[in-house]
Amino acid sequence: MSVVEFKERLIATQVWRSVFRHRYTDSNRNRSLAIFSNVFLHLHPVKVPEKNIRFWHTMCLGGLSFGLFLILTVTGVLLMFYYRPAAPQAYRDMKELEFVVSSGAFLRNLHRWSAHVMVLLVFLHMARVFFAGAYRPPREFNWVVGVLLLILTLLLSYTGYLLPWDQLAFWAITVGTNMAQAAPWIGSKFRFLLLGGNVIGENALLRFYVLHCVVLPLAAGLLMAVHFWRVRKDGGAGPL
Amino acid sequence: MRVAALASCLAALAATGAGGAVVLIDFVHPKVLFEPPTAFRVGKPEDFPVNSITADYDRKVYIVRTEVGFFALSAVCTHLGCITRWLEDEGTIACPCHGSKFGKDGSLVQGPAPRPLRRIAIRLEEGELVVDTVVEVEEDSILRA
C-alpha cells in the first residue's frame, strides 16, 4: 500500500470523517471551513487584509498579553501541585519549590516574571489603542471590555502577591487592603469580606488563593473570549 | 399578554439574582473568627518604670507610663496599617513602610500618616493592666497611677 493509498483510506474512514468534515483541496470554501469547523481556530478571521497585519498597527501587544496569560496558566497550574494555601505550609512550600523541586525555581520565576511583563504589556496595549484612537466607534464596547481585562490583570497580580506568605507579601497586602478600606461607606466591610476577618491570616490567604486560581482567571477567560470575538466583529486588525 | 409574561419572568429573575447575592454575601461573611483576642493583660503597673515606653510588637501596642499615669497606643500606623517601631535614640515612633513619625505620646510628627497613633483603652483589672485594642479613647485620656 503506497502512502497515497494509505492517506486515501485514512481520510475515508468514519473516525477521520467524524473529526474533519471537509477536504483539503485549496478552495475558498475549504479554507473557510478549516477555520469555521475548528473550535481552536474559530476566533480567527477566515481572511485578513494584508495591511491589517502590519507589525506597527498592533505591535502584537494584545497577542503577547494573551501568550503570557497562557504561560501563566500552565506554570500556575504546575505550581499548584506543590502549594498549599495554609499557614505556615504556604511559605515552606514556596521554599520547597525554590530549592528542592526539580525545575521549581524555574517555574516559579517564569510565573513571576511573566506576571510582571503581562501587566506591562497589557498597559502598553491600552496605550497603543488609546494613541491610535482605536477606542472610537465601532470599537467603544471592546475598549470597555479591555479596561475590565486590565483591572482583572491587576487583581490577578495583586491576589498572587500574598501567596508566597513572606514578609513582602504580608505587608503589601496590609497596605493594599487598608487602601481598599478607605473607599467610602463599603470600604471596611469590603476589607473584612476580602480578608475573611479583621487581620491577614489563614482566611485571607485561602480567599486570595481561590480568587487568584479560580475566580479571576475564569472571569478573565470569559472576557477574553468576548474581547477577541469583538476584535473580529468590529473589523480591522487581525490576530498577531 | 406576552409582555406581561416577559415582565414577570424578568421580575422573577431579578428577585432570584438579588436573593442569590444576599445569600452569597452572607456565605462569605465568616461567623466564627480564630483571631488573637483584642483585650489582653500586659503586666503589673510596677513592671513599667515612670517615664518609659514599652513596646509589644506581637500584640501591636505601646504601654507608656508618665509621671501622671498610664496610657496605651496602638502600634498600627494610621497611614496604611504597618507596625511602627519605637526608636530609643531618636525618641520617636517611626513607621518602616512610608516613613511616618510620631512622638512618644503618639502625636503626629511627620507624614504621610494623617492622624496621631490611636490611643486605646487601658484599665486595671485584678492588679494587672489590661489593654483593649479595639476600644479607642480620647487623645488626652490617662489611667492615673
Image: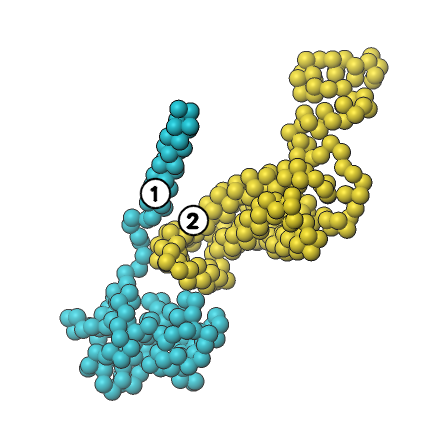
Is residue A78 shown left or right of residue A89? right
Give the residue at x 38% y 56%.
A186
Q: Nearer the viewer, residue A53 or A175?
A: A53
**Colour representing chain A:** yellow
Say which chain tag 2 marks: A
Position of the N terminus of chain B, as image quadrant, is: top left
Query: Residue under circle 2?
Result: A207
Q: Secondary structure at mark 1?
A: helix
Name the colouring of the figure.
by chain
Q: Amino acid at mark 1?
A: Val
Label 1 marks a residue whose chain is B
In this picture, residue A75 sits left or right of residue A212: right
Q: Residue at x 61, y 44 (%)?
A: A142
Total numbered labels placed on residues in the image = 2
Q: Colour of chain B?
A: cyan
Residue A133 at what x, y percent from top left?
68, 52
The location of residue B18, given as percent across then percent down, is: 36, 40
Q: Label 1 crowding class (10 Å Cα cut-off): few <14, some 14-19, many 20+?
A: few
The kind of residue tagged 2 is Arg
Question: In the displayed structure, does residue B24 sit left or right of residue A53?
Answer: left
Which residue lies at the image location 48% right of the left edge and 62% below the top edge? A172
Report which residue position mark 1 lands on.
B22
Q: Is residue A118 above or below residue B88?
A: above
Displayed quadrant of residue B59 = bottom left
Q: Is residue A113 visible?
A: no
Foreground label between 2 and 1: 1
Assign a secondary structure to mark 2: helix
**For the C terminus of chain B, which image quadrant?**
bottom left
Foreground residue among B117 and A190: A190
Task: Tell me if residue B96 comes above or below residue B91 in the rendering.
Answer: above
Q: Which mark is residue A163?
A: none
Q: Position of residue A2 (x, y in %)?
A: 84, 15
